[in-house]
């Protein structure tokens, strides 16, 4: 044991570095997060259920998770398309577009929020064409979904791109030599290789959309039971000093985030094994 | 044997690509999707900001409440970025250059703030430092305001920007390995010498990448800051909160004028990020070829 440690850990500074890391991690992340669970633990089981399963709260879960799911699916489909086009084809402005895909990462959520709200508002750039046809985007769950598509856009593209780039064209050529049509090659060779990355990106986009606040509250109608997202409900309860209720709902969201984080990690492990 | 049908003139690579019309269609759809969801909102920010002309734009930015929001945002970023940079470098050193049990658990824990909703991120600090929180009575006795004041905003921002530098440096340093540092040690360098003269040049682009993303998030954070701030104009509003206030009172041109500052920051962030990424790739391929 002594020999093994000495072989691996000869560089100096391990103990202080690790000690500081754990210390800082604890006071900034772990202890505050634990406050959530401790506060929730002060509620009785009945109080907890009342807080997290009330009709208004359940409606917010439906809105939030439903819209996130739809947005993640849209991003899954179009994200793969965008990644494919960026990796396989050449066209003018490709590098610029490639860099711009990361815009939702870099753009502050409030800016995205007011911009999307004004673009899809009844007199907005797009809203004025959609409203006469009965397609109401602003202040409806549809608007929530549109905002979530924006913020989740880079996730699938950026997880699929590296996989597509590493794809060996020789395999496709071999398939073609053996008589496969292009569609068969795509369906049976390319798609299974890319699938883990698509799922990972999908899960990331979904997880991000569920927790998102700033981009959504401007375009959502924020009407309880109809277009109110769960993060907004938490803030509303805070403003009404219902700390226990807010904390209970936040705990539910946190646990779900952890579960999604876990599945994303497992998906990434699967795709790494697949790649080898 | 079934033979695939080809044109007589088969160009190289034609059998591994789609027909031209399919390619055109796919490119059009992809670009159309991106134009709709990316370019349109980006353009809208600037067009709406300049809706009432240049003077109104500049006047909106010189408004006292906006200036103090800009000041608070800069102050917050000045605190958060160096603190999280230091942590990121130290954590990456401990994680990437050593083997120990529980490493992947530690990495997962460091990634936690990424998966937590911004509103929850703010809420947990209210639970500790708020009036009804763990430290609330003690803070009140000593007349220290954290929640609904600047320190709370800084704390919440530190939380949400916590992982950026670390999660960029850890894979980078792991793929660079320990060889160079160990060589430096055998040649007699001390720990700090090794770090500054061997490790740092290798990771400087990774540091830039992490710092620029950390900064973008620190300046743009909305949800978490919204929870811990008192929303008091002129004192506890950051730029994003100021944008919200202006928008909610229908001062659209002013709201977009302030928002355009953040949009410009986003574009600068993207440029620096792209350059840093490219340089990181270069550094990694140099390391690979030296093996």
Image: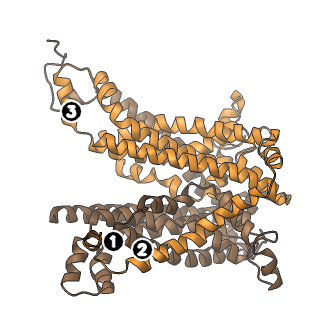
Chain colours: A orange, B brown
- How many other residues sit within 10 Å of disc 2, few (<14), some (14-19) or many (≥20)? many
Residue A258: x %, y % from top left: 57, 50
Quadrant the N terminus of chain A occupies: bottom left
Q: Residue furthest top?
A: B1
Q: Are marks 1 and 3 in contact (CB under 8 Å)?
A: no
The residue drawn where x is 72% and y is 74% is: B63
The chain to which mark 1 is attached is B
Residue behind mark 1: B203
The residue drawn where x is 36% and y is 61% is: B171
Q: Nearer the viewer, mark 2 or mark 3?
A: 2
The residue drawn where x is 45% and y is 50% is: A101
- How many other residues sit within 10 Å of disc 3, few (<14), some (14-19) or many (≥20)? some
Tell me if residue A19 comes above or below residue A227 in the rendering. below
CA distance for labels 1 and 3: 35 Å
Residue A82: x %, y % from top left: 41, 40
Task: Provide the secondary structure element on which disc 1 rests.
Answer: helix
Residue B233: x %, y % from top left: 77, 72
CA distance for labels 2 and 3: 41 Å
Residue B89: mark: 2
Q: Nearer the viewer, residue B136 or B88?
A: B136
Whether labels 2 and 3 belong to a single chain: the reply is no
CA distance for labels 2 and 1: 9 Å
Q: Nearer the viewer, residue A79 or A97?
A: A79
Task: Provide the secondary structure element on which disc 3 rests.
Answer: helix
Quadrant the C terminus of chain A occupies: top left
Residue B156 occupies which quadrant of the picture?
A: bottom right
């Amino acid at each position: 044991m002594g020999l093994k440690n000495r072989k691996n850990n000869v560089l100096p500074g391990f103990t202080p570095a690790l000690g500081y890391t754990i210390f800082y991690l604890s006071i900034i992340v772990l202890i505050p997060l634990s406050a959530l669970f401790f506060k929730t633990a002060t509620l009785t089981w009945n109080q907890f259920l009342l807080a997290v399963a009330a009709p208004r709260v359940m409606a917010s879960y439906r809105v939030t998770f439903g819209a996130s799911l739809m947005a993640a699916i849209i991003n899954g489909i179009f994200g793969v398309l965008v990644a494919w086009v960026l990796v396989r084809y050449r066209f003018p402005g490709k590098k610029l577009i490639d860099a711009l895909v990361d815009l939702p990462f870099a753009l502050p959520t409030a800016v995205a929020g007011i911009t999307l709200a004004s673009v899809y508002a009844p007199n907005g750039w797009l809203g004025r064409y959609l409203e006469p046809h009965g397609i109401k985007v602003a202040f409806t769950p549809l608007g929530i979904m549109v905002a979530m598509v924006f913020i989740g856009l880079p996730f699938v593209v950026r997880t699929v791109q590296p996989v597509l780039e590493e794809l060996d064209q020789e395999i496709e050529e071999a398939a073609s030599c053996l008589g496969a049509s292009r569609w068969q090659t795509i369906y049976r060779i390319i798609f299974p290789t890319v699938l883990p990355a698509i799922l990972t990106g999908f899960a990331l986009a979904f997880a991000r959309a569920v927790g998102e606040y700033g981009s959504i509250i401007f375009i959502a109608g924020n009407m309880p039971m109809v277009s109110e997202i769960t993060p907004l409900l938490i803030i509303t309860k805070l403003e009404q000093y219902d700390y226990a209720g807010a904390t209970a709902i936040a705990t539910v969201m946190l646990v779900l985030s952890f579960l999604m984080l876990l599945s994303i990690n497992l998906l990434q492990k699967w795709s790494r094994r697949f790649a080898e | 044997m079934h033979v695939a049908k080809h044109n007589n003139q088969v160009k190289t690579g034609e059998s591994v690509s789609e027909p031209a019309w399919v390619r055109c269609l796919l490119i059009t759809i992809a670009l159309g999707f991106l134009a709709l969801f990316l370019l349109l909102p980006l353009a809208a920010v600037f067009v709406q900001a300049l809706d009432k002309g240049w003077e109104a734009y500049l006047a909106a930015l010189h408004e006292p409440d906006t200036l103090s929001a800009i000041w608070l945002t800069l102050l917050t970023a000045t605190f958060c970025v160096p603190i999280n940079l230091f942590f990121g470098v130290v954590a990456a050193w401990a994680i990437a250059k050593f083997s120990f049990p529980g490493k992947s658990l530690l990495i997962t824990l460091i990634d936690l703030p990424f998966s937590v909703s911004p509103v929850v991120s703010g809420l947990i600090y209210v639970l500790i430092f708020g009036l009804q929180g763990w430290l609330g009575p003690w803070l009140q006795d000593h007349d220290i305001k954290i929640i609904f004041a600047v320190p709370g905003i800084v704390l919440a921002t530190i939380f949400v920007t916590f992982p950026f530098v670390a999660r960029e440096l850890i894979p980078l340093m792991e793929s660079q390995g320990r060889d160079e540092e160990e060589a430096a040690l055998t040649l007699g360098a001390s720990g700090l010498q090794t770090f500054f003269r061997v490790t740092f040049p290798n990771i400087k682009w990774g540091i830039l990448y992490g710092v620029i993303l950390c900064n973008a998030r620190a300046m743009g954070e909305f949800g978490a800051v919204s929870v811990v701030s008192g929303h008091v104009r002129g004192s506890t509003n950051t730029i994003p909160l100021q944008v919200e206030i202006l928008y909610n009172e229908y001062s659209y041109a002013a709201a977009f004028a302030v928002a355009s500052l953040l949009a410009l920051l986003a574009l600068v962030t993207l440029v620096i990020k792209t350059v840093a990424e490219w340089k990181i790739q270069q550094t990694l391929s140099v390391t690979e070829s030296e093996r």
